Amino acid sequence: MEAYLSTIIFFLIFASFYSLTTLGLNLQWGFTGLFNVGIVGFYAIGAYTSAILTGPPYPDTLIGGLGLWFPIGFIGAMVTSGIAALIVGFITLRLREDFLAISTFGIGLSIQLVALNFESLTRGPNGMYSLPRPLSGISESNLVDNILYLILCLAIIGAVYWAFERMVRSPWGRVLRAIREDETASAALGKNVFAIRLQSFVVGSAVMGLAGAMQGNFIGFISPQDFLPIFTFQVFVMLIVGGSGNNMGALLGGLVVWGLWSFSEQVIGAVLPATFNTEAGAVRIVLIGLILALALLYRPEGILREKRIVSREARLS
Amino acid sequence: MLSIVDLVKDFGGLRAVDGVSFEVGQGTITGLIGPNGAGKTTTFNMVAGAFPPSGGSIRFDGTDITSWSAHQTFREGLVRTFQIPRPFSRMTVLENLMMVPQGQIGERFWNTWFRIGAIRAEERRLRDKAVEILDFLGLTRLGEEAAGNLSGGQMKLLELGRALMSDPKMILLDEPGAGINPTLLGEIVDRIAELNKRGITFLIIEHNMDMVMTLCHPIIVMASGKLLMEGSADEVQTDSRVLEAFLGGAVDDDAEATVG
């Protein structure tokens, strides 16, 4: 019984990392139409920032080992991911939208290469280990520790969800959608398209960085292997399946698709002989692609559709 | 109200607008007509700030706005609509209007966390204003409908509504009558006349001569990038230069009747 509970808690903690990242993407893609395909880059920046701020000293790194309190690590993660987004966005958001896609794709790949090669900052392929897990050691039991961490994750998601709902269901959110629908008409109506897009891009990326930090400090170990391009693809599938343009849909999409992904590992592991272990990974990626295709064909609006009325006050009666 | 002096626009080797000067008096509904390629929409685009002129000057309400961009002229109270309506399709009709006013408190995202009460009060004010405009345009029952589901004519009314949300001094209408059924056209003509009585100046590009002749005074005629003449509906209809520009020379009684 306790083993089952432990597995479920562990699953939900991981789902919360994905759900939070999907929430960040929803602000960018779902509401503003910004095609960010470098999600994993911003996620990795957050994880490494928190590792440097909260981690123990290592004999072979320049900085780090600061051993700071975890909220400082999490906030630092948001700040550095946000600054990275500010730089990328400032250069590309004035241009046609394809430029954002190409440059974020490049960022996603190059951040991983930096992590792999800048050994005096990130310890390269050896990774950063013994990162402190928030709220651990309060009890003797590992299960209780995990439950406490899950509560922390849910509290963070709750706070971000509240903040995002306030943002998107307001005049600011209305301008976001107007820009997504028709950039030229928005500009003709006196809106500063560039500034608002940049705000959306930076805030969304900061939340991705926060999710990365939450993962790194939970596992206690990060290495470049944790930040592969497949992650970006997974998060996009989560958003499409859950409902692009609906914050609750984004959270739900993270949970559902992560559930299918984890479940498929069990099933494929049980069905395929052990000698096909390598192929099993490929089968799962095919499965995710299949889910995306089916979602686009049969329910393109996602599990939860976008609300047509943006602002709470924008009703006739 | 609006004064244009020696306006010129070159596109590469093509001179689309060639030294045009005219005035739009305050409180008028001025018509701008001319055959296709006369430079009407180009003139419009320069006035509304879509692109700067190659030469000449534009003054609006005493201010030089010659090379201003679209959002600057918009803030000055000079608003344009598009020849092809550009609604925000997946937003409601009501919110298409509510997004228009400038400098809303709730357009700064941090205010959405810290100034909840102020935004709510502002939103109610905007909603009431938008509903008033929808009532005026006869679109109220479509208020919560997605703007993309409106008919072409209703979209034109919606564009007019968006322009009105900014309390403009002057509205530039680019072919408000194009592709509209006669009933809705009468509706649009009535609304424009009513708004004009309330003090808004209009400059209208239009090909529908019935609409121009009943609504506009004075009427400015352009042809081949130049100003041809300016006058009342009667003067324009009887001017041989105008008939020549529209019909390319062969002026007989039948042709005259068509233009009239």
Image: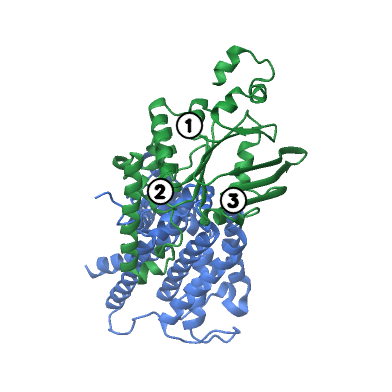
Chain colours: A blue, B green
Mark 1 and mark 2: span between their CA atoms? 21 Å
Q: Amino acid at mark 3?
A: Asp
Label 3 crowd bin: few (<14), some (14–19), many (20+), radius 10 Å: some
Q: Amino acid at mark 1?
A: Gly
- In the image, B30 versus A278, the foreground residue is B30
Residue at mark 1: B177
Whether labels 1 and 2 share one chain? yes
Residue at mark 2: B96
Q: Which picture quadrant has residue A235?
A: bottom left
First in residue order: circle 1 vs circle 2: 2
Observer able to see residue B191:
yes
Tell me where residue B151 appears, x and y as whole percent: 40, 33
Residue at mark 3: A98
For the point 32% across and 65% down, the residue is A12
The furthest residue to the right: B13
Q: Are marks 2 and 3 in contact (CB under 8 Å)?
A: no
Which chain letter matches label 1? B
Q: Which picture quadrant has residue B43?
A: top right
Q: Amino acid at mark 2?
A: Asn
Q: In this rendering, is residue A45 above or below B80?
A: below
Tell me where residue A79 appears, x and y as whole percent: 50, 74
Circle 3 SS class: helix
Mark 1 and mark 3: span between their CA atoms? 37 Å
Q: Nearer the viewer, mark 1 or mark 2?
A: 1
Which chain letter matches label 2? B
